[in-house]
Image (tube, rainbow, N blue to C red):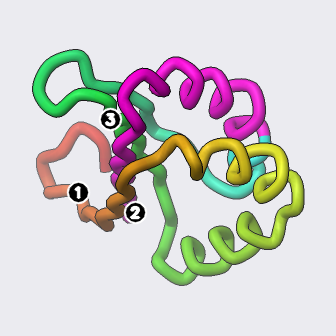
């Protein structure tokens, strides 16, 4: 199993808007293409960030499902069009679980 940790930095003062948009528009759409493991936002440390983790059976599956997501007009028009202007930075990391990890 592969895990992708995505960290987005949101414009100051726009976090609530970003979270509401993701919950209402983004989550129902992306859930058809990817498996969400967890979703958080920062309270202490670097502020205005959201961190989410997605599970993939393989990197090939990730490539295929991400391509399908990017071709989904609902994703592009109902979520991305609203979300992208709220973002400052995006980061994506592919992670492998250690043999002793509770989530594998």
Q: Position of residue 88 (x, y in %)?
A: 39, 50
Q: Position of residue 62 (x, y in %)?
A: 55, 72
Give the mark, 3 or 2, whose residue is nearer the N terminus: 2
Residue 7: where, in percent of width, then height? 34, 48
Q: Are marks 3 and 2 in contact (CB under 8 Å)?
A: no
Tell which tag, 3 or 2, sits nearer the viewer. 3
Name the residue beneath numbered marker 1.
97
Magenta stretch in the rendered image? 1-28
Task: Report the residue marked by disc 2.
Answer: 1
Q: Quadrant of residue 65?
A: bottom right
CA–CA distance in space, label 3 to label 1: 23 Å
Tell me if 65 is positioned left or right of 78 in this view.
Answer: left
Q: Looking at the picture, tell me which residue is in the foreground, 88 or 94.
A: 88
Q: Quick one: SS at disc 2? A: loop
Residue 82 quadrant: top right
- The quarter of the picture where the N terminus appears is bottom left
Local secondary structure at mark 3: strand
Above or below residue 5? Residue 21 is above
Instruction: Tell which circle, 3 or 1, labels the residue nearer the N-terminal end.
Output: 3
- The correct choice, above or below, for 41 with respect to 76 in the image is above
Q: Residue at x 36, y 55 (%)?
A: 89
Nearer to me, 97 or 54: 54
Is tag 1's residue or tag 2's residue first in the polypeptide sequence? 2
Residue occupied by mark 3: 49
Membership of 3 in magenta stretch? yes
**Category of crowding for the residue at label 2, using alpha-carbon neighbours closer than 10 angstroms: few (below 14), some (14–19), many (at least 20):** few
């Amino acid at each position: 199993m592969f895990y992708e940790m995505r960290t987005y930095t949101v414009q100051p003062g726009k976090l609530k808007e970003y979270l509401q948009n993701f919950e209402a528009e983004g989550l129902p759409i992306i859930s058809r293409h990817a498996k969400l493991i967890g979703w958080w936002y920062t309270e202490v440390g670097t502020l205005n960030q959201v961190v989410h983790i997605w599970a993939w059976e393989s990197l090939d599956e990730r490539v295929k499902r991400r391509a399908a997501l990017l071709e989904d007009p609902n994703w592009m028009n109902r979520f991305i069009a609203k979300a992208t202007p709220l973002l400052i930075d995006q980061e994506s990391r592919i992670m492998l679980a250690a043999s002793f990890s509770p989530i594998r």
